[in-house]
Amino acid sequence: MTGSGESGQQGAGGRSGAGGAPATVAFLHVGGTPLHVRTEGSGPVVLLAGGLGSSWFDWDLVVPFLTPYRTVVRFDRPGYGLSGSEPADRPGPTVVGEAERIRAVLDGIGVTGPCTVVGHSLAGFHVEAFARLNPERTAGLVLLDGSVESSPHPWPAPELRDLAARTVAGVATAFAVPYLLGPTVRRLVARAATVRREDLAPRPLVRHCYRTGRALRAVLRENTRYLDVAAELDELRGVVPLPEELPITVLAADDGCRTRRTEEWLDRQRGLAALLGADFRTTAPAGHLLMFDRPDAVASAILDTR
């Protein structure tokens, strides 16, 4: 792994941190892929990992609550945000591979001590695996409406599924589908995942990051390998325990509707908390993108996990 970093604002991605102070922006080469990483604030380190299809700016409303008390690290997985695509010969996503990526990001910016790792949705798998495989590097674990799968069984032929995902993305890109529809689809999905029914991410950044073929390929590859990653973590849970007395919080989004779907989701989140021995919280009203609906509650859950 090699790394290079520049401070301040960078092209389309440059934005100020809390109090107007510029974030430190770096592009780290991890496994042959340039990863966009930004660091801001001061104090104990917190790493934020986004869910399927998320970019660094999806945390923008949360970060100002954290930076007076924490050093906040955000990064884009390959294909998302300002990060490059993984080489074509790289295998599809794995939970161990994502845990190693988190460690490489921390190493690349010089963070070698324990930090709190925070994962939203799919990234809940990634940060839990990191905590299990790197107990000496983990000060706390926070899962925000994390993905939950009970006894997952992946579909067969993972290599063929990954090839199919890359092929579909390549054909769609050749016909300019991401360029024409990517930002619109992103906004529609975000609106559906909030009680606000609004995508609060900056429109110029959404256009810049979601009209690329690399973003579509990343979404398809991660979605195709979702059950594989869930099954891998399920197996890991049986052989690698979490550190004793590790502070863990599960924060679930409650949309305020007493529908069967909402109650089932909250029950699954309670089950995840019980499995991990975590503190269980809910925040309402909030959709799956609870960073948009309740950034204050997200920040409180992170700050209280220590």
Image (cartoon, helix red, strand yellow):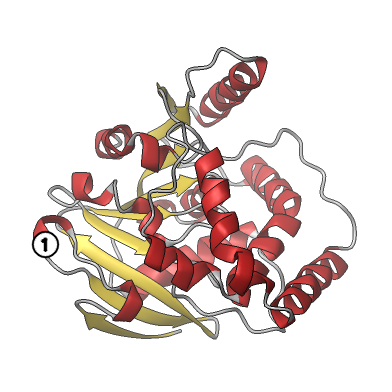
Residue 79, visible in the rendered structure:
yes
Viewer-side residue, 132 vs 162: 162
Residue 246, visible in the rendered structure:
no
**How many residues crowd around disc 1 within 10 Å: few (fewer than 14), some, or many (20 or more)?**
few
Q: Is residue 61 left or right of residue 123?
A: left
Please report the residue visible at 78 percent of the width from the left and 78 percent of the height from the top. 171
Image quadrant where one finds the C terminus: top left
Q: Is residue 196 left or right of residue 39?
A: right
Please report the residue visible at 54 percent of the width from the left and 72 percent of the height from the top. 78
Please report the residue visible at 40 percent of the width from the left and 32 percent of the height from the top. 249
Viewer-side residue, 163 vs 12: 12
Total marks drawn? 1
- Most extreme residue toward the top, as rendered? 258
Q: Quadrant of the rendered structure where residue 267 is?
A: top right
Q: Amino acid at mark 1?
A: Gly
Residue 73 point in image, percent of width and height:
31, 61
Residue 153 point in image, percent of width and height:
82, 44
Q: Which residue is mark 1?
A: 20
